Amino acid sequence: MKNTRKNELAVCGFEAVKALAKKHSESIRRFYYNDERTMAFGDLFRSLAARKIPYNKVEDTELEKLSGTVHHQGVVAMIEQPEIPHLTTEIADDWLHKKESALLLDRVGNANNLGAIVRSAAFFGFKNIVIPLDEAQSSITTSSYRVAQGGMEYVNIYSIRSISKLLTAMKGKMIRFGTDVRAKTTVERIPSLCEKKPALIVLGNEEHGISDEVRKNCDYLILIPFSENPDAKQPIESLNVAQAASIVLYECRKLNTK
């Protein structure tokens, strides 16, 4: 939940707040917890006290009000609303130098899906995520932070104005993949196709998938195959974008270690 008056974001959920406290405790402006969580954040309390940052034990109703959700899990940390840095040429050049791959989201609009993708990226050690500055694209919210289960502290999220311009700029420098249910190339081929260059993988919108413009600017279109049983029928055409991201990221887990 964003506090527009103070330009703050409520981070809630036990794992999300625990990771925030471990990695970026300096970003916490105010801290609230219920009686159940008193013993879990002793080190943080001492750190906040030393910095004269307020922390208070409150009732669950107050935590719900602060976070805007009943799913606060007994703890809420207020931080400054994160500013997503713009992806610069220097950052992209550093990816190329280090052979770091990146995930590009094409208008993934659901905050929970964004959080789940961030969680999977952190789990598989995939550090770079790019999102467009588009109203159809979800940004960092209380929900995405909570669903990411601490993953927000372990990935880098960048913004761009034009997906097509980024794909054009990376032509010949990164292997550009787009997920598409009509594709012929399967996801397990990603590592073998990226022996000399890092990957830039585009995940599409929940309803429409990747756009036609994105599709035309990819080196390969990839799909996740369904059951190999020849007698099996496919009742569902595609996976949820967050589920698909987990499978794609699993196949990409060795890319940045070559």
Image (spheres, rainbow, N blue to C red):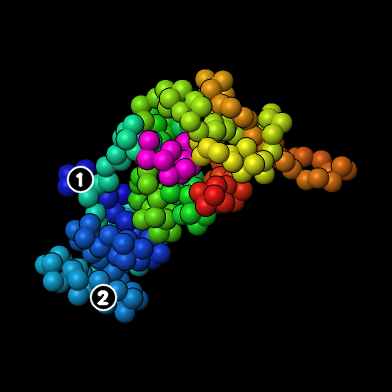
Q: Is residue 144 above or below residue 204?
A: below
Element under disc 2: helix
Q: Name the mark on residue 114.
A: none
Q: Name the mark on residue 7.
A: 1
Residue drawn at (50%, 49%) of the image: 256
Residue drawn at (75%, 40%) of the image: 235
Residue drawn at (43%, 59%) of the image: 149
Q: Name the spot of residue 159 as percent of width and height, x first.
A: 35, 35
- Residue 102 sits inside the magenta stretch: yes
Looking at this view, name the residue that lies furthest to the right. 231
Note whether residue 76 is visible: no
Please state if 251 lies on the left or on the right of 152 as rendered.
right
* Image: magenta residue range: 93-104
Q: Amino acid at mark 2?
A: Asp
Q: Name the mark on residue 43.
A: 2
- Residue 127 sits inside the magenta stretch: no
Please state if 197 lies on the left or on the right of 43 as rendered.
right
- How many C-alpha atoms fall within 10 Å of the one at disc 2: few (<14), some, or many (≥20)? few
N-term mark: 2 or 1 = 1
State the residue in front, 155 or 149.
155
Q: Name the spot of residue 96 as percent of width and height, x first.
A: 43, 38
Residue drawn at (74%, 43%) of the image: 226
Looking at this view, name the residue that lies furthest to the bottom. 39
Q: Name the spot of residue 42 as percent of width and height, x first.
A: 27, 77
Element under disc 1: loop
